[in-house]
């Protein structure tokens, strides 16, 4: 894979990581009445911040410059969480969990697509695989919390 494509791929993941970090922060703020959910969402936000740092290192190692920005899709997602929160009772964390599940499923699909490239450098593939596994665990935990809330 040519260097520019590797950097572009990593920068896409970097944007996604920071979008997810902000999304989980917003979810934590939206779940104020649920201390367990607040703690869970904060941990997820911190994990995505950590992903961002790892990805930035990989970008630098491959001679690129990290982008730092938020995607349009993430802004829409965050607005949707705010609207959904306004339309549901304060004690209903299920709607927030459902939206987080949707976001995690989207993140997994994105990682799967990028991991499908045959010519990724080994270090990038290893990093992406590790992060994808963490997101899969997060999704499973989120689904468990959603099932318990329902």
Image: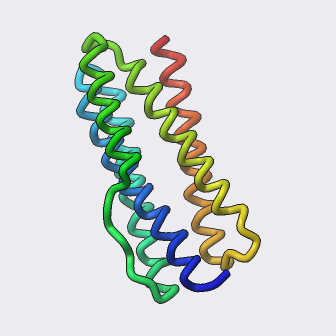
Where is 21 relative to 89, above or below?
below
**Residue at screen point 60% across, 60% down:** 130
- Residue 46 versus residue 68: which sits nearer the camera? 68
Quadrant position of residue 92: top left
The scheme the figure's colours follow is rainbow
Q: How many marks?
A: 0
Q: Is residue 67 left or right of residue 118?
A: left
- Residue 24 versus residue 69: which sits nearer the camera? 69
* Image quadrant occupied by the N terminus: bottom right
**Residue at screen point 40% across, 46% down:** 73
Residue 30: give x, y in percent of width and height.
26, 28
**Residue at screen point 62% across, 77% down:** 123
Quadrant position of residue 78: top left
Q: Is residue 13 left or right of residue 68?
A: right
Q: Is residue 38 left or right of residue 8?
A: left
Residue 149: give x, y in percent of width and height.
45, 14
Where is 143 relative to 19, above or below?
above
- Residue furthest right as drawn: 118
Residue 112: give x, y in percent of width and height.
66, 54
Residue 72: give x, y in percent of width and height.
36, 50
């Amino acid at each position: 894979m040519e260097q520019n494509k590797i950097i572009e791929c990593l920068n896409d993941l970097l944007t996604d990581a920071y979008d997810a970090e902000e999304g989980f922060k917003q979810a934590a703020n939206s779940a104020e009445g649920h201390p367990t959910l607040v703690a869970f969402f904060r941990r997820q936000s911190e994990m995505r911040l950590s992903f961002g740092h790892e990805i930035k290192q990989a970008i630098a190692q491959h001679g690129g410059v990290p982008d730092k920005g938020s995607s349009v899709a993430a802004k829409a997602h965050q607005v949707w969480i705010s609207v959904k929160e306004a339309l549901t009772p304060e004690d209903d964390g299920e709607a927030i969990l459902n939206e987080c599940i949707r976001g995690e499923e989207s993140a997994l699909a994105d990682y799967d697509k990028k991991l499908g490239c045959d010519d990724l450098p080994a270090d990038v593939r290893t990093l992406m695989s590790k992060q994808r596994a963490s997101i899969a665990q997060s999704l499973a935990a989120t689904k468990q919390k959603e099932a318990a809330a329902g």
